[in-house]
Amino acid sequence: MIRQDLDATALSQAVVTGETTATSVAETFLERVQAHEPDIQAFVAFDARQVRADVAQNSGRGLLAGVPVGIKDIFDSADYPTQFYSPIYAGNQPSRDAHAVTLLRQAGALIMGKTHTTEFAYMHTGPTRNPHDLARTPGSSSAGSAAGMAAGFFAVALGTQTAGSLLKPASYCGLFAFKPSLGLVSLEGVKPLAPSFDTVGWYGRSVRDLHLVARVLIPGFQMPDVEPSPLQLGFCRTSRWDQVEPEVAHALEQAVEQLRNAGHHVEQVLLPEEFAGVFDDHQLINDCEGARSLAKEFHQHRSQLSPSTLAMFERAAATTWEQESASKARLATLAPRLDELCQPFDAMLGPCCAMVAPLGLESTGPSDFIKFWGAFGWPQVNIPLIRVDAQLPIGLQMIGRFRNDGVLLRAAQWVAADLQAGA
């Protein structure tokens, strides 16, 4: 059996060099699923026979050779149903894989199954539990992928983010996560919600795993090949810092101090007052685009939609075309100003979530600190802070300027290493 602490990069290298086999890797992960899935409920579709049949065909080659991957159940897949956590699509079987799933397979990855999501990747939550505390939520719509990663069911997992659906579960479950710049990864075969913000992202066990998957899903992706050096980092609280719980604020302040002790320059960045409206503009656009994306389901199957999704339609119906256009215009006006403010820095830092994972499975908490940057399509990374056994995970968010994804991942690699060294 393989070591349980190996990341996807090490696993693929071990398979390619013959140190282990894809079969051995798969069996190790299947054992974990068998032992813990009844408690976690990360999968909406899983078949050990299918996994073993796939691994028998695995070539043992590629960037992700033999690496087990979880797929959020809004990505089409030819071998498992795609149901969007909605009774409307019960048993829905696509005829082919989504673009991102195909690229993963071509890179040698082994699909472990489909992971639970919220209804249409919006608000209505599924049954998945947080492996760190089964009484707590694992986060929002990429919850099954995040919880499965944290439970050791796969080494990489696909998710998506429209507001906070990727980074929030990463923060709650203690994972590395990367949401690239808007538009870099194809959304072909992925159920849309709000196209202005919808982005494919993924979880890994290290920053180098995030980079490895980026090389697979973003053809031509490059990370600057430069020696580690002191970083210029901006710490941005945003106008909603007062929502941050003391435990989270303290952990973030400690992380900033560690980075300064490691030689990095960390400067507080204050945003002009007009940026306080970004949160509401994101929500308004999300509602209006979501209502358009789900219009056919609303008209044909209204009784099968959850109250939270119906509430989205009510808000959208009360919003004029002019109001939505004004929100989009404000974001377009603010984007170059934000870029100018952040230009002196290698990356921005901030809270990922205002709290640790809340108790219960129905509420996942706000996504404000994530969706602020997502409103502009900027790339985002979650760095799990070092915690002792009795403490719940807390995430440090790192943000790069638009399409500066490689620079962000390089900075995240150094930050993660220095936080680990200083723990």
Image (cartoon, rainbow, N blue to C red):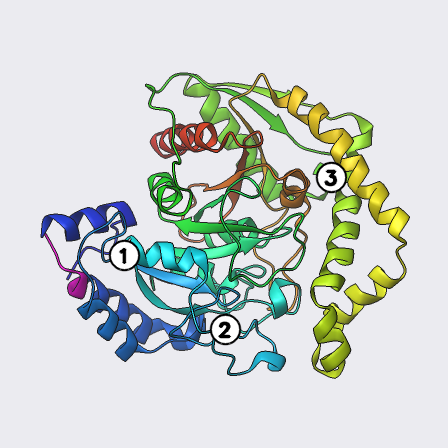
Looking at the image, which residue is at 45% across and 51% down?
Answer: 202
Residue 162 appears anywhere in the view: yes
Task: Decide whether residue 23 is among the magenta residues.
Answer: yes
How dense is the environment of label 1, judged by Cα within 10 Å: few (below 14), some, or many (20 and up)? Answer: many
Which mark sits nearer the N-terminus, 2 or 3? 2
Name the amino acid, label 1.
Answer: Val
Residue 367, percent across and down? Answer: 66, 50
Name the amino acid, label 3.
Answer: Arg
Q: Circle 1 is placed at which residue position?
A: 67
Name the amino acid, label 2.
Answer: Thr
Residues in magenta, as a range: 19-24
**Label 1, label 3: how far apart the Cα atoms are:** 39 Å
Looking at the image, which residue is at 29% across and 76% down?
Answer: 50
Depicted 326 relative to depicted 304: above or below: above
Quadrant into which the N terminus falls: bottom left
Which mark sits nearer the N-terminus, 2 or 1? 1
Quadrant into which the C terminus falls: top left
Depth check: give the residue in front, 317 or 177: 317
Question: For residue 240, which numbered disc appears in the image?
Answer: 3
